[in-house]
Amino acid sequence: MTQRYPDHIWHNGQVKPWAEATVHVMAHGLHYGSSVFEGIRSYPTPNGQAIFRLTDHLKRLFASARIYEMAMPYDLATLAQGCRDVITANGLERAYLRPIAYRGLGGFGLSAETPTDVAIAAWHMGPYLGPDVLEAGIDACVSSWQRFAPNTIPAGAKAGGNYLSGQLVAREARRLGFGEGIALASTGLLSEGAGENLFLVIDGALHTTPVSAALLNGITRNSIITLAKANGIEVVERDLPREYLYLCDELFMCGTAAEITPIRSVDGRQVGEGKPGPLTRRIQDLFFGLFEGRTPDRHGWLELL
């Protein structure tokens, strides 16, 4: 099946035809993984199309670039407008946005000085892990691949090179017939999914692994914690051993792409009743209620197009 690409993309300051946004084969980012990026979604709402936590995502993009000493040639306001422009140019009613900044063509060494190029793509994307997963859930496995150890690669940066780890985790899971993989940290304790954060439901409380567990501090993760606390749901951030995946009452993954995806089994062992549980459904209702008008947007997360 031929991939249908969008018609337009924002590249280095202007919206242009998709095919014209090219990268040289000797670009630094291609050879060394020196890129930082974001995944952002927009949703139709009763007040019009809104980009979810656009400013927070772009702030994290700039933070990731700062970690890698990558000079950003555009300010946040310019990139925010670029996100809006590329949605409009492609006529999208809802969108997945991918802003990316990368070291372009320059010197050839690891520490070479290169220009920073920036692009923003937008396309329609349904549920990341499959068309029915938000309702039915997925079967997951613990990967044989662990996350990187502390002080090796900064897990707090959303950098392209970090996702080599996620590729190994995800591809192993698919090869074994699972919907997604779960990675352990170098400590042997739980980290996160291939590209998603984890929440376990234990005795009516949400438990999630801390940012020290080699994971990205997800914006969807933060949104869930904020919504849960505001609605009287206890949230506990703590180290979690692998076996808690088999003992918890409910389990779900979250992320911009994955949204809130229930997990019904891990390593062939049923989680809870083997279907999305009541607290998972409650969190889904609170989250998607933001876009449908049921959950008040008390934090200004919905940034209208």
Image (cartoon, rainbow, N blue to C red):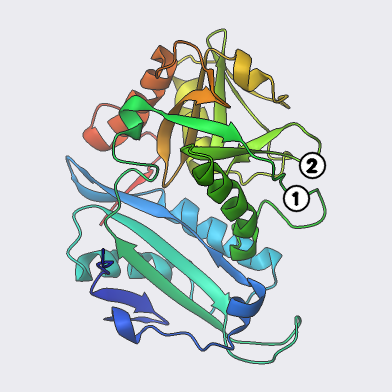
State the residue at coordinates (25%, 57%): 305
**Residue 239 appears in the rendering:** yes
Question: Which residue is most to the front?
Answer: 176
Tag 2: amino acid = Ser
State the residue at coordinates (22%, 34%): 292
**Total count of labels:** 2
**Are the residues flagged by discs 2 and 1 in contact, CB closer than 8 Å?**
yes
How crowded pointer 2 is (Cα within 10 Å; few <14, some 14-19, many 20+) is rated as some
Q: Quadrant of residue 26?
A: bottom right
Give the labeled residue for mark 2: 186
Q: Quadrant of residue 293?
A: top left
Quarter of the figure that contains the N terminus: bottom left
The circle on residue 148 is: 1
State the residue at coordinates (48%, 54%): 57
State the residue at coordinates (75%, 81%): 110
Question: Marks 2/1: CA distance?
Answer: 6 Å
At numbered mark 1, what does the secondary structure look like: helix, strand or loop? loop
